[in-house]
Amino acid sequence: MATLDVVTAENRRAGSVELSPSVFEVQVKPHLFHAEVRRQLARRRRGTHSTKNRSAVSGGGIKPWRQKGTGRARQGSIRSPQWAGGGVVFGPVPRSHEHSLNKAFRRAALRSALSHKLEEKAITVVEDLPLQEHKTRRMVEILRELGLGEARVLIVIDAESPFVERSARNLPRASVLRVAGLNVYDVLRHEKLLLTRAAVAAIAARLERKSRGGAAS
């Protein structure tokens, strides 16, 4: 069972925390990342791309010339696909790109992503984030004290915290997620993870509880 030091916002040691091996020490499987990130990004697509086929293009209601006697190939409409300005054959139409993965697969991908970050030694556990007001400057100071000032960092908290969420909102290299919204895409696209002690326990409760039915890890 892996153990990480817990530090204060001033980067002083405040104890240690044991990480659940079924969440943070599973085999890293990149194919799980690929499938889950594709699902997440596909779900975000608006799917509003569209083209017009020959029936939707205006004009072309009559034959451009008579059927026979002109020496030219017969044509039924100037809006046929081979004409400039004509309809598009098999063009894209508005649709949803969303596809599904089963819950066991998605949980396994998240456990694998967290284990990958632990292997990279990219996880920092902080006792708490003591913000009592909406101050971006204070959040910058905390990240700098923890050695995360220059990194792209994902801050994970256990529950709603308006002071933390709003204080980090304007930082281009920092994002805040609650444990309920923790996902593979955001874990992988950030260099570092900053977890509160409470968030570590909440992550274990979320993933361990739902993995007891025999889900692959």
Image (cartoon, rainbow, N blue to C red):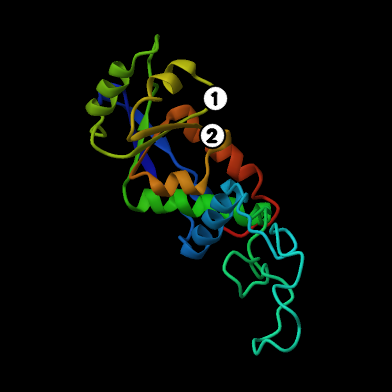
Q: Which residue is mark 2?
A: 179
Judge by depth and name the residue closer to the eye, 161 or 89. 89
Residue 162 on image: x %, y % = 48, 17
Q: CA distance from mark 1 to mark 2?
A: 7 Å
Left or right of 30, for residue 75: right
Left or right of 42, for residue 167: left
Residue displayed at 35% across by 53% down: 119
Secondary structure under the numbered disc 2 in the rendered image: helix
Judge by depth and name the residue closer to the eye, 4 or 106. 106
Number of residues whose C-alpha sits closer than 10 Å to that of mark 2, classed few (under 14), some (14–19) or many (20 or more): many
Image: 81 above or below 162: below
Residue displayed at 49% across by 31% down: 199
Q: Pointers 1 and 2 in contact (CB under 8 A)?
A: yes
Question: Could you say which quadrant of the image residue 101 lies in?
Answer: bottom right
Residue type beneath disc 1:
Ala
Residue 88 on image: x %, y % = 64, 67
Q: Is residue 24 visible?
A: no
State which quarter of the image contains the C terminus: bottom right
Label 1 vs 2, first from the N-terminus? 1
Q: Which residue is mark 1?
A: 159
Q: Is residue 52 visible?
A: yes
Residue displayed at 67% across by 50% down: 212
Which residue is farthest top?
A: 132
Q: Which mark is residue 43?
A: none
Residue 209 on image: x %, y % = 65, 42
